[in-house]
Amino acid sequence: MKIGVVTFPGTLDDRDAQRAVRLAGGEPVALWHADTNLHSVDAVILPGGFSFGDYLRCGAIAAQAPVMESIIDAANGGLPVLGICNGFQVLVESHLLPGGLIRNEHQHFICRDQKLIVENVDTAWTNGFKLGQEITIPLKNGEGGYIADDETLKRLEGDGLIAFRYSEVNPNGSVNNIAGLRNERGNVVGLMPHPEHAVEPGFGPDTPLAMRSGVDGLTFFTSVLNQVVNS
Amino acid sequence: MTKEISTVDTTKNAKKTPEKEQPWRELGLKEDEYDRIKLILGRRPTSAELAMYSVMWSEHCSYKSSKIYLRQFGEKVTPEMTKNLMVGMGENAGVVDIGEGWAVTFKVESHNHPSYIEPFQGAATGVGGIVRDILTMGARPIAVMDQLRFGAVNNPDTARVVNGVVSGISFYGNCLGLPNIGGETVFDKVYQGNPLVNALSVGALRHEDLKLAKASNPGDLVILFGARTGADGIGGVSVLASETFDADGPSRRPAVQVGDPFAEKVLIECCLELYAAQVVAGIQDLGGAGLSCATSELASNGQAGMRVQLQNVLLRDDSLTPEEILMSESQERMMAIVPKKDLKAFTAIVEKHEVEFSVLGEVIREPRLYINWGKEEIVNVPPRSVAHDGPVYERPVAYPVWIDALNENSVINAKLKRSTGAGELAEQLIRIVSSPNQASKSWITDQYDHYVGGNTALAMPDDSGMVRVSEETGLGVAIATDANGRYCQLDPYNGAKLALAESYRNVASSGAVPAAVTNCLNFGSPENPEVMWQFKQATAGLADGCLELGIPVTGGNVSFYNQTGDVAIHPTPVVGVLGVIDDVARRIPSGWQDAGNNIYLLGITRDELDGSVWSEVIHDHLGGKPPVVDLSAEKALAELLQGASLQGLLASTHDLSEGGLAQTLVESTLRFGMGARVWLNEICERDQIDLTAALFSESTARVIVSVGREDDVKFVGLCEARGIPVLRIGVTDASGQLEIQDLATWKIEELRNSHGATIPELFG
């Protein structure tokens, strides 16, 4: 099972996403921003970072990269695509998901262990969760405040397109506590927090049981592998 | 820049016009230094040569006042200490063999003066600079840490500096993708006009990937790549680092460099790919003194020379003069020495990363640096005279006239009031843990990414930061840094040893074995004999301490002129200790994890309150002598922790330092929100001290550990066998509170608010 992980100039969490794929049992394939070839991968991850230095707007330049032409086409054809943090911003800038992401309400970059509620499990990347499940994965961003116009919000809420909501603390002022979205088809998911940082005991968030032992993020990657196997 | 040196001044012209007036004084050179340049060259220098010598012979680049003292770090060593040292002092950063074919390189450096003028950019480029030093050794940078000193919290200027510096580090470090795993933040009015912004980076490499900054093979190409050269930081090195801030002085803002972390991230990946392709024979980053430094150091290190065409430098600003190009400190640039046959492969890699480059010239056998501007020769110098044979000063040293009185004014002689009532002591404890220096720094550290890379095994608020190096075996490194300026003001010799002792203890507390030392020595003006005495004492203390502990200094940095007017900062020798752990899965956190564990205090508590947090927060007092340093006790303690950790006996370890036992108990409670019941009477009885000393004394060589009941006998037996004083002082519990018997009981949330609210209230 091959999962592509895209590297743009300024991408930071590509190696982490590759590790997450490996730990879930998949085979990570590095995809380069300037290359339109997707190397027959079964799914694609757009990892976190500061692609193209976040110049212009976060994700705006990356959305125009050659590899994105192929990814947008493939996503419209049903290829599972996960955008994490900067990858979520790229999905929004590519119009694969609606709305926008702006500077955190408090104006600071924030890194914290974040509780989320899984709002939708009918997607390629969340089918292994239980509906309403509370999970903890790291969040780290400066521009994670989700915004959308009223009409879009109504549609997102009405059509069940909200994949994750922040629980307990809204860390960046996102409307309706939105942490992540899915598209209508359920193959494209984007979120600000970082599941790839909660996949390996010893290096994830603290849990009540043990230090840094949280692996809630692993389910994102096992979900997509299950879906690909089953389809 | 004055008019004279902005016109092209050739070597031919210099020979013809020996009497021409040159602005050596404005460039920070002394008259005898200027005479020496003329002697080396046999003529007056051209304006370009003058620019080069002036930056390279500045205090910042040449270490001219500190060199004679830094030598002892290389001399006070045993063969046993240096057996794992692959590269020692003098290179961009020291390299330590950590086994399994892996090596790590680490270093801490100051960016103090720029950070006062322009806190955001100063701090940002401080991170960028140290990361390039690590990259230059052939390593992938894997983590950063920052050691910060700010002025008094109630001074209106402090918030400007704090917010700027923290945002700058956050901006640059986060965008580079390096986890920030720890550091220090201290507030003291002595740093009001001289904040200290030190940045540490650590990198990992396979042994065979080690790179050195040298150009030794004639015919190899000299290539400048990365960002274009602009007007930033021109004269920053010599002007900023050699002058003390003066209230009436002109604005220095244009001399501060501006950073672009995106460019640096691209440069890191580009360099690592160049290294992997083995197309680089030598590499040097461009930092202080820019091209002047890179060309002369590469040639001097390689015992060769270079011919360089300066007009080939890609510019952001075409109006730059040759002198300005030589001095520019534009960030995110590297210089590579590339064999001609590898140029094609080199070009393919840098073009893949869309990094610009230009071939400036080539390496020559003759040990001479020739730089042309078009057809005109503007530099013709022996590279060694620029890079390594700068002036060395043995500055006058004087025992400070004020220090005896300061040492005499101890807590006891000053008759500082001690409380005996439980209520009053409990109130002092809260005042201490919520004081700006002892309060939680999470408002700062939450602005830094500590997850990126997926290898962070420990980060703040644990005693040291720890990152995994090998994913296969779990091999990793731990790093802690420390400096207590108050102790160093009282006694710089022992103060430096105390900083070493605490960093060493912090690393040992995490389960790692201390292996190497780096330092960043922040002092006042070397032209003040009393400051020079402090420097002499501190370096001797650190070198002696390292010898006693058996761990070598691998490199470091000196920052002088940290003073405003005549008033110097407290001597602040930041000491970083790196430890090695064979499997990071064995790391030990600083807080209690499970209910029902016994809490043990290891080590002896003496009545040592001089220079303490208690004396500062409760009495606004500084005097007396700092705590006694006992490095053999530190060593024995570290070995015990090592043994106990290998047997899996320790659920947590937290060292005792500033704020004493009181601070450590509160932090251990808050780490995971696990409560405890603690008693002090047995400490007081055994060590013959009162409650104030039991709670707040800062005696060294102490930690508290928590141990599961099933491991009790084994653990106590281990301590007794090794002669480590051990005393059971409490039990952890799930009560949701910290109880210190006969003193007070606090709800954990109450402590969390006291400890956590201070910094956000001041700066948030």
Image (cartoon, coloured by chain):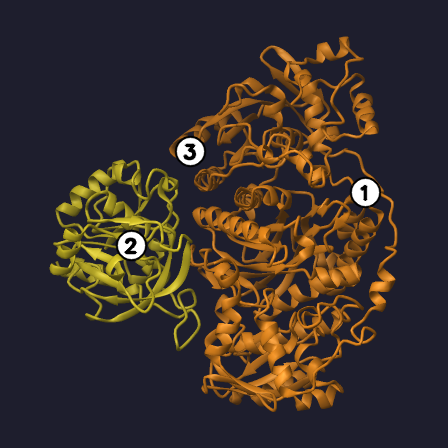
Chain colours: A yellow, B orange
Q: Chain of mark 2?
A: A
Sequence-wise, the earlier of marks 3 and 1 is 3
Q: Tell us which disc is closer to us: 2 or 3.
A: 3
Which mark is nearer the camera, 3 or 1? 1
Residue A24 at what x, y percent from top left?
29, 62
Q: Residues within 10 Å of mark 1 (few under 14, many from 20)?
A: some
Label 2 in the same subunit as label 1: no
Specify the quadrant that holds the N terminus of chain B.
top right
For label 1, the SS is loop
Task: Output the chain of dot 3.
Answer: B
**Amino acid at pointer 3:** Ile
Residue under the image location 37 percent in, 62 percent down: A138
Q: CA distance from mark 2 to mark 1?
A: 62 Å
Q: CA distance from mark 3 to mark 1?
A: 48 Å
> Which mark is drawn over residue B349?
3
Residue corresponding to mark 2: A27
Observer-nearest of A106 and B576? A106
Q: Which residue is mark 1?
A: B527
In this rendering, is residue B41 above or below B644?
Answer: above
Residue drawn where x is 71% and y is 17% of the image: B46
Q: Are marks 3 and 1 in contact (CB under 8 Å)?
A: no
In the rendered image, the vertical position of residue B152 relative to residue B31, given as above or below: below
- Tell me the CA gap for discs 2 and 3: 26 Å
Circle 2 or circle 1, nearest the eye: 1
| Dot 1: chain letter | B
Element assignment for label 3: helix
Badge 1 amino acid: Glu
Looking at the image, do the residues carrying marks 2 and 3 touch, with CB atoms under 8 Å apart? no
- Could you say where residue B226 lies in the image, as x and y percent from the top left? 48, 32
What residue is drawn where x is 61% and y is 50%? B198
How many labels were placed on the picture? 3
For the residue pair B365 and B68, the one nearer the viewer reads as B68
